[in-house]
Image (spheres, coloured by chain):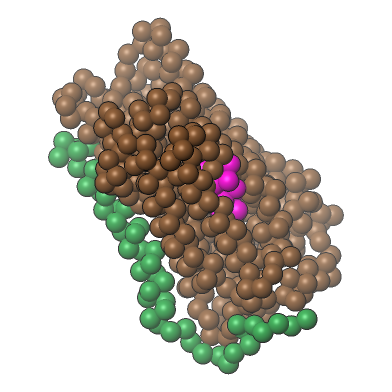
Amino acid sequence: MSAPSESSSAPRAVNPVLAAVAWLWVLVPFGYGLYQLLIKIPALFGG
Amino acid sequence: MAIGFLQRERIVARPGWSRWLIPPAALSIHLAIGQAYAWSVFKPPLEKGLEISGVASALPFTLGIIMLGLSAAVFGTKVDANGPRWAMFVASCCFVAGFLISAVGLYLNQYWLVVVGYGFVGGIGLGIGYISPVSTLIKWFPDRPGLSTGIAIMGFGGGALIASPLTSQLLTGYGATGDDPSVPGIASTFLTMGIIYAVFMSVGWLLIRVPRDDWKPAGWDPANAKSAPLITQNHVSAANAIKTPQFWLLWVVLTFNVTAGIGILEKASPIFQDFFRDSTAAEGLAAAAAGFVAILSLANAIGRILWSSTSDFLGRKNMYRIYLGVGALLYLALTLTTNSNKVVFLICCMLILSFYGAGFATVPAYLRDLFGTYQVGAIHGRLLTAWSTAGVLGPLIVNAIADAQIAAGVQGPGRYTTSFMIMIGLLVVGFVCNELIKPVDPRFHEPDSTVTAAEKEAAT
């Protein structure tokens, strides 16, 4: 059986806004975590 | 069989879909479930608020890691059969339910509900979530499997970087810190995190797509793809894979590589303080140790993507030669130089931790090379029992030896050198096992008709 598929639409490129939002969705929290980690490192060298 | 919008057929990518939307989908899951590594932030308020022991407060995490390995092994075949959206959705439901059940348990002062909720139910979410994007990423990136799985599995390492400060801030905001933490405040932290993760992970299962059977990256020709004796064009089922020596050799390789990393990771802060107590002022020592833990976390995360990507060029077997062989030499350098040079100490520890993370990140591509893509998710799931084993073995070795040395009155680096020598031995055994890995015997290969029929069934 062949149900309606998201693959059945005509070829078209992905909306760049969707791609940007998707990457920001994961990079923003990751950047927050990375920043929180980096500010601890100077103490290792007596900072 | 998955139903409705969770079905694999509903997520077959339309022509023109970008494969670069798959890593953020995978990261939405892995950045969330990586929270497990930040469990230690909950321990002090739970111990003080509920007046429970350190062992009891560690129970939800321990059970969670055991369930991660078990559920990945048990549900791996179902994940491959039902597709990544089903797997990500189920993982999200279990992981979030774990937080919500824990919140209810704390509101009711019933700690066993935290153990069952976070550890058992949430742990199932960890296992299914961990393997959910792996085979899909490998299919979207046949030219760069190491890079693609490295991105996702780096997310699991990065999840703790996000969860750790987030949890601390929520606990503070709800008055659940200090000597008399509010138990309802801890419950509210679980509730809030459950809601945040429910929203965050939804992007994963909404965005994930599988490629069409005939899809391949632009300009990439499988006929011209890099060929090597260990890269198979055939397929091995999960049931057959566990009958091969290659699977069990790789199981030992992963177990000992992880055990060696945990050897430092488990006691990073006390190791640093015992190594450099004399040369650092007392008030700065704790802060410096926290910096040491942070820099190891960074090395762990970077190693996952850096070395796993490099494996696309150098080959998987060569990378494990580096992880295990160079890892053993680094442990030897640590044993010999101890605290005589802080820079050497830091470089050795960072590289060891980068190899620890890389061992996780490179293994899905190694499995793809050996067993093909047919049931690589399920095979990966079964291999993750090595992680559960190492999660018990590593801390057991380091803690038992350190405790014995402390009881014997040993001071400084001497508390850990025996553990380090054991790690060298384990890494050498792992190195030998990696050398013994040869191509899988053709009698384990699936007939082409089986693979094609399975793909057709999955697509209808």
Q: How many numbered marks are there?
A: 0
Tell me where residue B389 appears, x and y as whole percent.
Answer: 60, 34
Residue at (46% x, 22% y) in the render: B399
Q: Quadrant of the C terminus of chain B?
A: bottom right
Which residue is at the front of the view, B12 or B442?
Answer: B12
Residue beneath the point at 51% across and 23% down:
B397
Chain coloured brown in the rendered structure: B
- Coordinates of residue B184 in the picture (x, y in percent): 37, 40
Work out whether B180 lies above or below A26.
above
- Locate residue B79: give its quadrant: bottom right
Left of B397 or right of it: where is B50?
A: left
Looking at the rendering, the stretch of residues picked out in magenta corresponds to: B118-130
Residue B236 in picture, x, y percent from top left: 76, 57
Q: Per the image, is B12 magenta?
A: no
Q: Residue furthest front?
A: B108
- The green one among the chains is A
Residue B359 visible in image: no
* Residue located at (39% from left, 69% from top): A23
Residue B378 against residue B178 in the figure, above or below: below
Residue sitting farthest toward the bottom: A10
The residue drawn where x is 45% and y is 34% is B109
Q: Position of residue B424 (x, y in %)?
A: 50, 29
- Horizontal placement of B314 versus B181: left or right? right
